[in-house]
Image: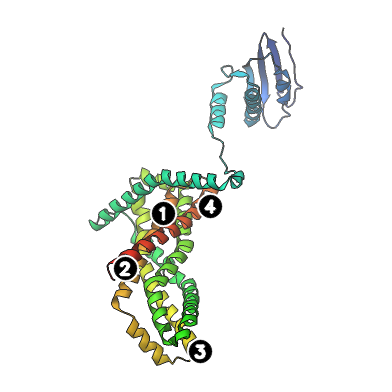
Amino acid sequence: MTKAVESSAAGEAGQKLETRRVDDGLLVALSGRWCLDQTLPSREIVERELSAVVRRLTFDATALADWDSGLLTFLAGVLKACAARGVAVDQDGLPEGIRRLLSMAFAVPEQKVALRAAAGQSLLARVGAATLDLIRGAPAMLGFLGEITLSFLRLSSGRARFRASDMWLEIEQVGPRTLPIVSVISFLVGLILAYLGADQLKLVGAQIFIADLVAIGMVREVGALMTGIIIAGRTGAAFAAQLGTMQVNEEIDALRTLGIPPVDFLVLPRMLALMLMVPLLTLYSGFVGMLAGLLVSITIFDISFFEYYNETLRALELKHFWVGLSKGTVYGAMVAFAGCLRGMQCGRSAEAVGEAATSAVVTAILLITIAASVMTIVYYQLDI
């Protein structure tokens, strides 16, 4: 049985759409001029003919004249309708240019958006998924660590390729511009330590040892830890967002094409900047925390300035400064590693950049916590 349906003509040259049923197939004949400046036939004309008996769709475009994206939109809709109904499509009757454009259009994968329903999973399922993600991500982290190690070896031999101006720019971002937030947080933490220690020390009349508690705590442990967490939230996320955006814009691919190692050019300056500046910020944080302890001791517990000053000098030893500096260096390296790793692993979408920034902060804080625990135990065993 053969059936033909003809659309109304429009425009100067007009266009015609005919459908002919042949056995279990449907032939779609296109003729005339198919451009957006005309009123084009609706694809519903073809969709109505796609009954249950139609198994194959073919095209005849021998009489087709001019065409533009209007025809492509029409054909794309027809192809989607055929795919939904399980109808096979033979595009041999279409011009080669149209076939190539349709192939490119349908070759773009559908963007996978994270499902919000994942929050409804059970606790055990979420823990299992997080564990599997950690196991799968371990090889990538080790591989990236190896690339950074090779980059430092190239730096030691003078073969690392990066711009010194980039490193100084990162030093400015990490160092001077971080002082305000480090000052505020360190002062408040020193204040808390002083009050917390005084509450217990006053029970035995030993308020003077507030100076010992604040000085050793801030210089050795708390200053480095708080600075590392601040840098993780401020700079680690920025590194991930910067490198993630470069990944989206294919700038990292361009560096590889030019023969420039991205780890040397992008990661190494950031690693050096944090490893140089975080120890200095740690010392500064300890000093601000001691000032907060001094303020509390003088105003609340009637300890004179010289008593607090002399007790601080007596309590602090050179090893406490070295411990704080070493921890600050490690924490800075951890933050740079996490931020650059997540940035280099970023997908090619705006959502992926946001996820990379969030993941960088979480990873950096986790690595800082692990490093702090391990280093504290090691220093205790070595009596440092």
The amino acid type, in three-letter code, at marker 3 is Thr
Task: Report whether residue 303 is seen.
Answer: yes
Q: Which comes before the other along the chain, label 4 or label 3?
A: 3
Q: Which comes before the other along the chain, label 3 or label 1?
A: 3
Q: Crowding at label 3, few (<14), some or many (≥20) Cα neighbours within 10 Å?
A: few
The amino acid type, in three-letter code, at marker 4 is Gly
Q: Which mark is residue 299?
A: 3
Q: Which mark is residue 354?
A: 4
Q: Secondary structure at mark 2?
A: helix
Instruction: Single out the mark in the foreground, 3 or 1.
Output: 3
The amino acid type, in three-letter code, at marker 2 is Tyr
Do the numbered discs 4 and 3 sit on residues whose CB atoms are within 8 Å?
no
Q: Secondary structure at mark 3?
A: helix
- The Cα–Cα distance between marks 1 and 4, rounded to whole angstroms, is 14 Å
Say which residue label 1 marks. 340
Q: Is residue 340 left or right of residue 50?
A: left
Q: Position of residue 304 (x, y in %)?
A: 43, 92
Q: Position of residue 255 (x, y in %)?
A: 38, 47
Q: Which comes before the other along the chain, label 1 or label 4?
A: 1
Which residue is farthest left? 157
Which residue is farthest right? 8
Q: Quadrant of the C terminus?
A: bottom left
Say which residue label 2 marks. 380
Instruction: Report the front residue among 109 and 286.
Output: 286
Q: Crowding at label 1, few (<14), some or many (≥20) Cα neighbours within 10 Å?
A: many
- The Cα–Cα distance between marks 1 and 2, rounded to whole angstroms, is 32 Å
